[in-house]
Amino acid sequence: MRRNNLILVCLFLSGLALPLRAENQFNSFAIKQAGTLLSNPPLFIYEFQRNMESTNPLPPGKKFGVNTHLLGGIVIIPLPDITSAFNVAGKVRLHPEGKLAPGLPQLDLVGGYWDSLLTTLIEQKGATADDTETKITRAKLGGSYTGVVLTSSLEPRVRLFWGYKLSMLNMEIGLNRPETILGNKVSSFKSELTEHTVSAGIEHTYGPDKRWILEGGYGVKNNLLTAKVSWYRKYLELGLNIYPESVFIMQPQINLHFNF
């Protein structure tokens, strides 16, 4: 059963993360978190979407940019995740800092979209209700986000920014025959998640095309806290996301971006 396999995976990862003397306590924690995961799958998958969402400002002098999420992960080493199958995001500068009036912040519009192409690998469209095993005949998984970012300079190399982001995620699964899940007969599953996030951060530029960014956010609808530290080069971003309420608290990422 896929549900049992998922629990075993969580237990395996938990065993790698802690010393042996804490194995029993952590296994109990992993079982509890696996139950939370199964009770609300979109909320768990949204963690991967948060890894690909980019809500920091465009560099000074840049008018627009595009970026893509290459690798994320639930362990210390970044690995491909469901959003890296296909995703694209962009940023557009609507107003440069101080153009209309002294002290007026830079205004950027940000947004992105992803669609997991991996769902086709688990679909078995030819399955019928007469098959001896339960199979997935339809699977769709994807999401999007839009937001605005305001940025003001403290000094030539340090900027503060604030933002708002609306995130949406859609998940749909169809089975060839009803299956008992948590005491209920289920033949199809469709779920959506919406989150409104407010964020703030600081950016420090220490060389040509070199930036450190520290950012924090709060999802007001699902009570989700987020912290992120990123190291930016001209085309590459290395980041570490921290999700205190997550099954996997620390999640690294590697993103690629182009700013013009």
Image (cartoon, grey):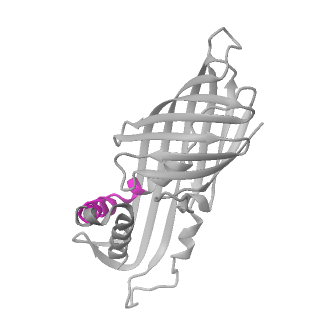
| Farthest-out residue, right | 260
Image quarter hosting the N terminus: bottom left
Rendering coords of residue 209 (x, y %): 73, 36
Q: Is residue 233 left or right of residue 164?
A: right
Residue 34 within the segment the image draws in magenta: yes
Residue occupying the far top of the picture: 102
Give the magenta-colored segment's residue range.
26-44
Q: Hey, which quadrant is residue 101 in on the image?
A: top right
Total of numbered circles in the picture?
Answer: 0
**Quarter holding the C terminus?**
top right
Left-right relation of 240 to 12: right
Q: Quadrant of residue 198?
A: top left
For the residue pair 60 and 86, the one nearer the viewer reads as 60
Quick check: 38 left or right of 119?
left
Magenta-drawn stretch, dominant element (helix, strand or loop): helix
Check residue 28 for magenta coloring: yes
What residue appears at the point 49 percent right and 40 percent down from the top-left corner? 228
Residue in the image at 43% along x and 41% along y: 226
Q: Position of residue 171 (x, y in %)?
A: 45, 60
Q: Position of residue 75 (x, y in %)?
A: 47, 59
Could you tell me which residue is drawn at 55 percent across and 75 percent down?
A: 121
Residue displayed at 69% across by 36% down: 210
Instruction: Give above or below for 7 relative to 39.
Output: below
